Amino acid sequence: MTARAQDHFDNLHGNRLIVANAMIYSEDSSHHPVKPRLHGALSATGIASNANGIKSYTFSNNFKGSIVTRDVTINLTGSYVYGETANILSNNDFTTSLDANVYEHPSKLYYWVLADYTSSHSLLINRQEQAGAGAGYNLIDKKKATLNVSDGLLYENGDLYDSLYGGPNGSVYQRDIYSTIRNSVRVLGHWVVWNKVSLDATWYYQNALSNSADYIMKVNAAASVKLRSWLSFTTSYAFNRFTRTRTENSLLTFGLTLSH
């Protein structure tokens, strides 16, 4: 092969490698961008009512910040919910979470680590810390359509008030300080319709390995209509159940989301 022919072969082979890499790190992928991306969102939603002189209101504030590269995604999220009904506190709930996903190429498999903190008046949680790791799989990985499942183990340390029923004076609240290992399953979906409407849904199920009756279940769903490139009207629904304290809550709110 002549030198000129060799150069032509090398250029052709190099171009094929570039195309192959572009297929792996597609701009249409939500997890494997060609260039690193920064994303941030802040939402403020709430609902208020006044029926027969009984006033109630609930406000929910959420934020999310993400760094997305070819191989790693780091997310920082947080939420705060405050509510009163007839001047009685119903919600004073705070949650924050830091997680990272590490992706393998070209496989759709990824690995995750997570640490979070929760304090919830409505779920009788004074404080609760979780930390763990696991693996996930992207069934669909597009900017306008995402579906993935994940599973892993979490170490949980908690400080609760657990309601004990059937005592001589009725229900008795007893301090419950504990630690346990949970299996954590998550299903997450994201869809964009007509470039204006986005739908998001997440389902969690976290059961204690030592007691199947001790579990946490969470459902989060949201629908957003884009008003501007940086502003959306959002309707969100959240449901939480914590069997250890025999409590559950649900919240439907409306409001605005700022995003970048």
Image (spheres, helix red, strand yellow):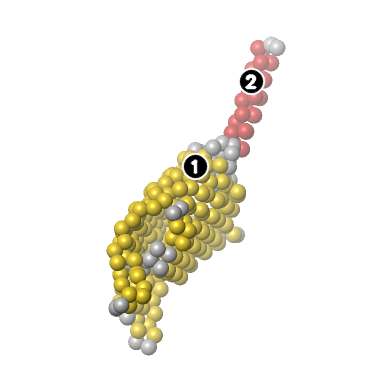
Residue 92: which disc?
none
Task: Tell me the kind of residue under disc 1.
Answer: Tyr
Question: Which of the labelled discs sits on residue 111, or is there none?
Answer: 1
Of residues 244 and 83, the one nearer the viewer is 244
Residue drawn at 38 percent across, 66 percent down: 245
Q: How many marks?
A: 2
Q: Residues within 10 Å of mark 2 (few under 14, many from 20)?
A: few
Give above or below for 34 relative to 131: above
Q: Position of residue 38 (x, y in %)?
A: 44, 46
* Near-viewer residue (174 or 77): 174
Q: Earlier in the sequence, mark 1 or mark 2?
A: 2
Residue 217 vertical position relative to residue 74 in the rendered view, above or below: below
Instruction: Give the secondary structure at mark 1.
Output: strand
The residue at the point 53 percent across, 46 percent down is 136
- Assess whether mark 2 and mark 1 are in contact (beta carbons under 8 angstroms): no
Quadrant of the image occupied by residue 19:
top right
Q: Residue furthest top?
A: 2
Give x and y (percent) for residue 10.
63, 20
Mark-to-mark CA distance, 1 and 2? 36 Å
Q: Is residue 214 left or right of residue 179?
A: right
Using the rendered image of the protein, determine whether residue 151 is visible from the camera's viewpoint: yes
Residue type for callout 2:
Asp
Give the quadrant of the N terminus. top right
Residue 36: x and y in percent read: 47, 40
Residue reaching furthest to the right: 1
10 Å crowding of disc 1: few (<14), some (14-19), many (20+): some
Residue displayed at 42% across by 51% down: 181
* In the image, residue 64 above or below residue 5: below
Residue tagged 2 = 10
**Residue 253 makes an appearance in the image:** no
Camera-side mark, 1 or 2: 1
Residue drawn at the location 29% of the way across and 78% of the way down: 169
